[in-house]
Image (spheres, helix red, strand yellow):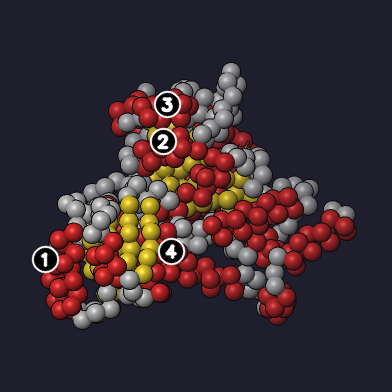
Amino acid sequence: MSNTAFQDIEDTIESANPAEEVEQQSEANAQTASAPAGEANAEREAEHKMRARPIPRVSIQAFCEDQRTADTFQTASKDRRLAKAQLTVQMGGIDAALTFYQNAPTPNLIVLESMQSPETMLADLERLAEVCDAGTKVVVVGHVNDILLYREMIQKGVSEYIVAPLTPLQVMETISTLYTDPDSDPVGQVIAFVGSKGGVGSSTVCHNCAWAISEAVQINVVIADFDLPFGTAGLDFNQDPVQGINEALTAPERLDEVLLDRLLSKCSERLSLFSAPGTLEQVYDLDVPACDLVLDIVRQNVPIVAIDVPHLWTSWAKQVLLQADEIVITAAPDLANLRNTKNLIELLKSSRKHDHLPRIVLNQVGMPKRPEISPKDFATAIGIETDHVIEFDAELFGTAANNGQMLEEVAEKSKAAEQFRNLAFQLTNKTEHKQETSKNLLAPLLSRFSRKKAGA
Ligand SMILES: Nc1ncnc2c1ncn2[C@@H]1O[C@H](COP(=O)(O)OP(=O)(O)OP(=O)(O)O)[C@@H](O)[C@H]1O
Ligand SMILES: [Mg+2]
């Protein structure tokens, strides 16, 4: 690599870090330089444990007394999970609500904040009951943490009583559990996989990770291949081409459980494909609401949806990323990937404040003769640790791709297969239980057998 190219990378890495961060790095070279970012990430991680689901198209009106509660609701109203709902926030508490609903119909959900004593609160609620339409749910935000008060509220028909101060995620979680039952409603988690550049192995990571979720974590997965003209999911799993995803996206209003079942091709007991046509007879200008609707329906039918998002920047591709529960960015260790990864992270960070940061997979590392940015420098520049560094191995990846097999099937003990398993456990918030040796010996054989049967 020429000196100028090196200089460019150094500049990029330096400009990616505030001065004090760079100082800390030279002090402790052995440590990953993204430690400050690490702390912020830990905060997000803790918040992320609370899993609010997307909230349906309901109308919500909040009447607050404390400005901080109003601000929290305002912040929540901008989150992706509330994108479909209509949330308005005003001050004045229960009194304002009573005046407002004298002449207006009540919405699906009313949130009332009260800083009053339990007795006054209960009396106020009685008055509100007189103006409330049937079917309207009520959530009360109080400032008294009292189990007896809570019970009395529930007895009076209040859906939930929560105690301030609240975080935006608590607000979203409270509302989402009113409309989805976490134990019975199968609202799946959407994981979007995207490459920082074309050809960096994003689809390979998506397919192998989805396979590991289905086999090692043992959760049902659908891979949705959104790369309609060039998608490789069908090839990678050795499946006959089906028009699956194209048919769904062309007429999303027709999609229901039965049609979905017909459009999916089953690869194994727990993994199905929503495969792309991979043909060029038509052009595919996808529609944002259609993508939204299709993903909504798929996620209602399967616990994990892994989306293979092509390397594009269109309205729908951006929307798919912004709406996902988790994002995995695959990058190769060069300057263009570094710039694009940084830009993607910045965009995602600013528009997804209550979500986990994207996971970074640095792929194709150590390609012979290629000048590369080291994983440590890459992590420093982007401010996120690259937990998953996958080596370039033309033979292994080439064999798997040409055979239509997953890495796990070609080389179960390879480091890459282990990385995919780790990523699968990380994304699903599960911990790995070591399998017994006897099971391990049979696992690859059994999984191939079950795949053959499912494909037959
Ligand atoms: N770690 C690796 N070592 C060697 N080859 C790899 C590695 N990862 C992926 N590949 C190969 O790189 C090629 C591109 O991979 P893949 O199609 O997954 O990339 P992509 O980012 O999805 O590309 P596209 O932008 O076309 O969608 C494939 O032939 C794949 O087998
Ligand atoms: Mg791809």
Query: Measured from the top left, where is residue 9 in percent x and y?
Result: 78, 59
Q: Which residue is mark 2?
A: 294
Check disc 1 and give the amino acid type.
Gln
Is label 3's Cβ within 8 Å of ligand 2? no
Check disc 4 and give the amino acid type.
Gln
Pair 1/4: label in front: 4
Q: Is 16 placed left or right of 64 in the picture? A: right
Q: Which residue is mark 4?
A: 74
Q: Which residue is mark 1?
A: 155
Query: Measured from the top left, where is residue 240 in percent x and y?
Result: 47, 22
Query: Mark 4 packing: few (<14 Cα in 10 Å), some, or many (20+)?
Result: some
Pair 3/4: label in front: 4
Residue occupying the point 19% across, 75% down = 121
Q: CA distance from mark 3 to mark 1?
A: 45 Å
Check disc 2 and give the amino acid type.
Val
Is label 1's Cβ within 8 Å of ligand 2? no
**Tag 3's secondary structure?**
loop
Q: CA distance from mark 3 to mark 4?
A: 35 Å
Q: Which residue is mark 3?
A: 251
Can you say whether 337 is above or below 241 in the image?
A: below
**Tag 4's secondary structure?**
helix
Which mark is first along the chain, 4 or 3?
4
Answer yes or no: is residue 252 visible. yes
